[in-house]
Amino acid sequence: LESDPSARLSIVIPAYNEAKRLPATLNRLHEYLTCQAYDYEIVVVSNGSTDDTVAVVVEAQVEVPGLRLIVLTERGKGLAARTGALQNEGGIVFICDADLSMPPENIQRFLDALKFADLVVGSREAPGATRYSEPWQRHVMGRVFNRLVQLLAVPGIEDTQCGFKAFRRAVARDLFGQQSVTGWGFDVELLFLARKYGYVVHELGIDWHYDADSRVRPVHDTLSMFVEIVKIRLRDAVGGYHNKSEAAPAGERSVR
Ligand SMILES: Nc1nc2c(ncn2[C@@H]2O[C@H](COP(=O)(O)OP(=O)(O)OP(=O)(O)O)[C@@H](O)[C@H]2O)c(=O)[nH]1
Ligand SMILES: [Mg+2]
């Protein structure tokens, strides 16, 4: 990244009612990123927020250069992520949860892994991952959930839902450009498509700090996510996905 002056890191933060958590997240990111050699921007995408999320971002724009805000009306983390991933100037797109449950120092590891992978997905299960202060019941629930997701859509991916994922620009354009679901199932769709098109996916074990505050409605969101996964499989079965991209998967690139 340092060797290419046109390369910029675009951090996309989907934010739903994050007025409380965002200020600290934006400050920590800003502190970390201003010390890096590369250029960056932070794109917060709020949709349907009913708290002061928008005002908090506008206020932070005074202190944080390169902070942009996109406001949508319809809800859905997938919709927010897609919008941010397609509307940015970055050579690398990094999706980042508003709670910043991963220390920003981990970002460099994603950038390093992108030298050989097309997309790097943060994982709480891959080698090198550490979970801090997560209740064991929650961990178990997550594992059961993941087994089902693997069975239905993406065998072998041990953590589809982690909120930290990095993409080379062309890969982001391709995958998010075809994303059809707008809720929590969007990660599964991106990974399903990445597999289908032969992109090199790297699961990167991260330091992850459990945050009890959550935007997830356990029953409602789990069910609607499985509905989304069924939609993905049906769409694929009727030939609804077309790879129009010019991005050659890393596995097929002759020169790295
Ligand atoms: N823009 C937008 N963001 C959303 C929506 N729903 C959730 N998010 C964002 O999705 C991210 C993840 O939400 P969290 O509350 O951290 O989820 P969690 O329960 O902690 O899940 P884990 O961090 O994976 O344990 C946050 O940045 C939320 O603001 C939505 O409808 N719109
Ligand atoms: Mg979280």
Image (cartoon, helix red, strand yellow):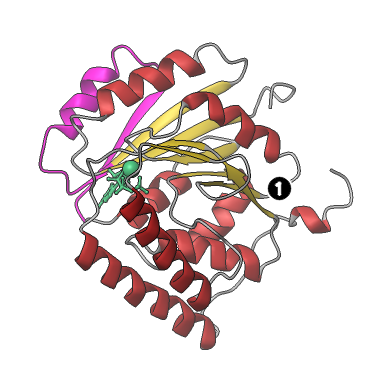
Q: For the residue labelled by badge 1, is the local secondary structure a helix, a strand or a loop?
A: loop
- State the image coordinates of residue 246 (x, y, percent, origin top left): 70, 58
- State the image coordinates of residue 30 (x, y, percent, origin top left): 42, 17
Image quadrant for the N terminus?
A: top right
- State the image coordinates of residue 185 (x, y, percent, origin top left): 39, 64
- Quarter assignment of residue 38: top right
Dot 1 alpha-carbon crowd within 10 angstroms: few under 14, some 14 to 19, many 20 or more:
many
Q: Residue furthest right?
A: 254
**Which range is magenta?**
46-74
From the viewer's perspective, tell me whether residue 147 is left or right of residue 62. Answer: right
- Name the one closer to the observer, 33 or 54: 33
From this viewpoint, is residue 78 visible? yes
From this viewpoint, is residue 179 visible? no
Residue shown at 34% from the left, 26% from the top: 25
150 drawn magenta: no
Task: Note whether 246 is above or below 94 in the view shown.
Answer: below
Residue shown at 18% from the left, 29% from the top: 20
Please state which amino acid type lies under the numbered disc 1: Ala
- Name the one closer to the observer, 46 or 103: 103
Task: Note whether 84 is above or below 1 in the view shown.
Answer: below
- State the image coordinates of residue 234 (x, y, percent, origin top left): 45, 85
Q: Residue furthest front?
A: 136
From the viewer's perspective, tell me whether residue 60 is left or right of residue 6. Answer: left
50 drawn magenta: yes
- Quarter assignment of residue 24: top left
Image quadrant for the C terminus?
A: top right
Task: Note whether 10 is above or below 176 in the view shown.
Answer: above
Residue at label 1?
117
From the viewer's perspective, tell me whether residue 240 is left or right of residue 214. Answer: right
Residue shown at 56% from the left, 21% from the top: 39
Task: Note whether 119 is above or below 51 in the view shown.
Answer: below
Residue shown at 65% from the left, 27% from the top: 6
